[in-house]
């Protein structure tokens, strides 16, 4: 399974970026192979509005089936749902730690957005 | 003559000044409450509303059977209101600015527009003042569409006073952009000065004639006056801080009833900016 994690850096030991739509980067980890790819999110980072929606489109195009992030607003959540992508919110720490915790079953997908839009 | 009352900083006294001017004017006068996210002029005027109509905006709807997910609509949309998810265009109407471009670029004619109610406009009279107000529904972002609807109800001769929304963003610009003169109401505090400078930059960019009213003029410091002097901006009126004024405002009573000595000053101000 491919997992997209919001990251403030470009490696697996980078801190997780708490924002979804305006995350610095997405790191996509393939749990089958352990390999990962890094994707810049500068374009959405600077969007006037709709960053979460476009970020959902980005991770959908990257083939992710699940997103791990800190917070996810209502429009991003709707977009991820429409793309059939599960969302884990409330994650902290480093990117590889989040993946490990997910695999141990310590992180559960959310059923709704955890913040209002424009919470930051 | 269109006279816009704007500020930058909120809570400086735009509504107070707009109401005092409207109630001091000789001859026909119209008051437009353009602060459609939090309209409040009606609380003081208590107008008799004789007309109310909804404000509608077209938003796109995608026929998923016809959409082939090409993404042309999404590329065109400047407001990120469309995403292509699982090979289909998905619309987020709360971000849509109703430009209609997505309908035009769709090669498979999968997008049509439906009218969506975003708020309303009301029209009435009170004490000889023609009154128009608008209200944007909660959760809707497009205040300028309601403001334009309010302004459409205000054609004709005579004096039109616009009570504008705070800030210097789209809603404020939509309100002041065609005004013959803009009165910027501020207060002599660092915050008041900071936002006054932003408002001055905005009305200069819009090439509007403008001047300043300082409310609660005896609090704070002299920096607003110094700034206006340095920038050659006329200060038309300084309204003193007064408990009577605040109390009347808090009860929804016209400030002029509590401070009748201000009426002559507002008449003079009107004569200066409309003359």
Image: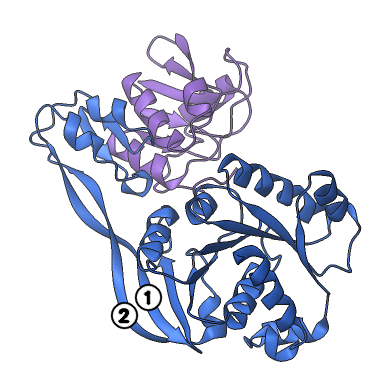
Chain colours: A purple, B blue
Residue projecting furthest to the front? B275
B97 sits to left or right of B190: left
The relative height of residue A76 versus residue B107 in the rendered view (above or below) is below
In this view, the residue farthest toward the right is B221
Callout 1 crowding tier (Cα within 10 Å): few <14, some 14–19, many ≥20: some
Judge from the rendering whether residue B37 lies leftward or rightward of residue B105; answer left or right.
right
Please indicate whether residue B214 sits to the left or right of residue A70 in the image. right
Same chain? Circles 1 and 2: yes
Residue marked by disc 2: B51
Quadrant (top left, top right, bottom left, bottom right) of the C terminus of chain B? bottom right
| Location of mark 1 (residue) | B122
**Secondary structure of the residue carrying numbered label 1:** strand
Residues under labels 1 and 2: Cα distance?
6 Å
Give residue B248's position: percent from left, percent from top: 70, 87
The image quadrant that residue A33 belongs to is top left
Residue B51, by quadrant, is bottom left
Mark 2 lies on a secondary structure that is strand
Residue at the image position 38 percent from the left and 77 percent from the top: B123
Identify the residue shown where x is 63% and y is 28%.
Answer: A93
Q: Position of residue A37 (x, y in %)?
A: 46, 11
Q: Which mark is residue A91?
A: none
In the rendered image, the vertical position of residue A30 relative to residue A5, given as above or below: above
Letter of the chain that mark 1 sits on in the rendering: B
For the point 50% across and 53% down, the residue is B171
Q: Nearer the viewer, residue B251 or A95?
A: B251
| Image coordinates for residue B22, horizontal then vertical, percent | 57, 77
Q: Report the number of discs.
A: 2
Pick whichever, B130 or A54, lies toward us. B130
- Up/down of B246 relative to A89, above or below: below
């Amino acid at each position: 399974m491919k997992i997209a994690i919001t990251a403030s850096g470009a490696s697996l030991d980078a801190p997780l970026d708490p924002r979804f739509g305006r995350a610095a980067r997405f790191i996509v980890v393939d749990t089958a192979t352990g390999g990962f790819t890094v994707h810049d999110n500068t374009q959405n980072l600077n969007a006037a509005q709709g960053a979460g929606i476009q970020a959902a489109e980005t991770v959908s195009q990257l083939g992710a089936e699940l997103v791990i992030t800190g917070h996810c607003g209502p429009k991003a959540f709707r977009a991820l749902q429409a793309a059939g992508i599960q969302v884990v919110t409330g994650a902290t720490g480093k990117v590889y730690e989040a993946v490990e915790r997910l695999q141990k079953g310590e992180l559960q997908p959310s059923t709704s957005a955890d913040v209002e839009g424009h919470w930051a | 003559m269109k006279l816009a009352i704007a500020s930058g900083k909120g809570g400086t006294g735009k509504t107070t000044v707009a109401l005092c001017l409207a109630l001091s004017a000789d001859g026909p006068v119209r008051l437009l409450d353009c602060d459609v996210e939090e309209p409040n002029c009606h609380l003081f005027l208590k107008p008799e509303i004789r007309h109310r109509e909804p404000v509608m905006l077209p938003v796109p709807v995608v026929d998923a059977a016809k959409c082939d997910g090409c993404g042309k609509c999404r590329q065109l949309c400047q407001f990120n209101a469309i995403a292509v998810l699982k090979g289909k265009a998905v619309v987020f109407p709360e971000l849509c600015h109703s430009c209609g471009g997505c309908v035009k670029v769709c090669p498979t004619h999968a997008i049509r527009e439906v009218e969506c109610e975003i708020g309303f406009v009301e029209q009435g009279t009170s004490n000889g003042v023609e009154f128009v107000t608008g209200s944007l529904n909660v959760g809707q972002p497009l205040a300028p569409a309601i403001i334009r609807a309010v302004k459409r109800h205000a054609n004709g001769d005579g004096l039109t006073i616009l009570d504008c929304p705070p800030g210097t963003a789209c809603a404020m610009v939509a309100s002041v952009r065609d005004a013959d003169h803009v009165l910027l109401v501020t207060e002599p505090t660092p915050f008041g000065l900071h936002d006054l400078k932003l408002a001055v930059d905005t009305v200069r960019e819009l090439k509007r004639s403008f001047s300043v009213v300082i409310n609660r003029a005896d609090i704070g410091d002299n920096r607003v006056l110094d700034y206006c002097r340095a920038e050659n901006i006329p200060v038309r009126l300084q309204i003193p801080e007064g408990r009577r004024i605040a109390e009347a405002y808090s009860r929804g009573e016209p400030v002029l009833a509590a401070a009748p000595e201000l009426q002559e000053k507002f008449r003079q101000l009107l004569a200066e900016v409309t003359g």
